[in-house]
Amino acid sequence: MKLFISLVLIAFMATLLFSQQNDIKLSFGDNTVINKNVNPVLKKNPKEKDFSFTVNPYLWTTAIGGSVQLPETQPYYFSLAFTDAVKDLKMAAMIAGRFKYKSVSLLYDVVYVKLKPELSVPVYTGYISGTAEIEEFTGDFSLAYRLPIKNKNIQLDFYGGTRVWSLSNKLDLTASNGSTFSRDTSKTFADPIFGMGGIFILSDKWYSYIKADIGGFGVSSDWTSAFMWGFGYKFSYNWNTSLGFKSIYIDYNKDKFIWNVSEYGLLFSLGYQF
């Protein structure tokens, strides 16, 4: 938890500093007279619309690991680096974006992953090997409010909403005598989440973004958190691309079903704004 908060604070202060430094350079970097009430970064762009819609399909190079327990089984552990996750990956789809009207937005971020990893099987269970088939759907849906800030190079949102989880886990274990054991269990639940996001305009083409939230609070999972930070480039008013880092964590333990898992990795997106 301390590491998560430290990462958020470091990323936020770094992007805030960059955006403010860039604002100073743009204001005083040449000899032309600039009206201090006009933002030199945004004046080249079309006037912001009251309503806009963005869609950002992305590739998340996910490393994943943690402990899993299904009813009538012991906890089992797995840890996959990105290269292992690609090898064990069966299917994946990711998309994010927002519907925005003036200062209010509906944010969405949907991830679907299907993996079939090898498990670390405790010796005391009597089994010598095991595999899991993991299907995970995560959907973040939140209502955000943009804070009124005079510096148009900085856009800050507070948001609250829900993180929907749908998990389907199948365990296949093999004993030393050749006998097998299988168990298949599914869970669908939702966690409340609260967070803050920011977009920092670095130039007429470059920008940075950050987003972080916490949730769960025992409503469904004991705890969940997510963090994103990256830099983007605008080809035009409509088209953009970005490279960043994303992590998500959950600690769920109910009805002898444990899903204590961390996922993190680089992401690359290509976005369009309507």
Image: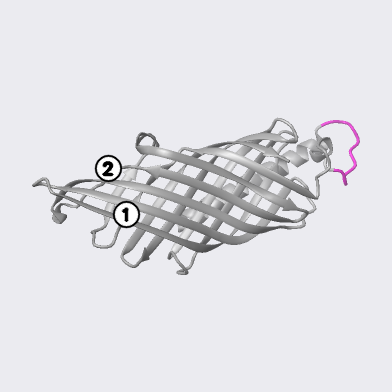
Residue on which disc 2 sits: 118
Q: Disc 2 or 1, which lies upstream in sequence?
A: 1
Question: Compared with residue 90, is residue 218 higher up or lower down, i.e. above or below?
Answer: below
Q: Residue at x 39, y 45 (%)?
A: 64
Quarter of the picture holding the C terminus? top right
* Residue found 69% across the figure and 50% down from its top: 99
Dividing the image into 4 quarters, which one contains the N terminus?
bottom left
Please provide percent x and percent y for residue 187.
40, 59
Asked whether 165 or 224 is in front, the reply is: 165
Query: Residue at the spot x=61%, y=62% of the render?
Result: 160
Q: Name the residue under label 1.
A: 67
Residue 199, how many percent across, how many down?
Answer: 67, 46
Per the model, the C-alpha gap separating discs 2 and 1 is: 13 Å
Image colouring: one colour
Residue 250 location, quadrant: bottom left
Label 1: which secondary element: strand
Read off the magenta span: 30-38
Report the front residue among 90 and 197: 90
Q: Which residue lies furthest to the left in this view?
A: 177
**What is the chief secondary structure element of the magenta stretch?**
loop
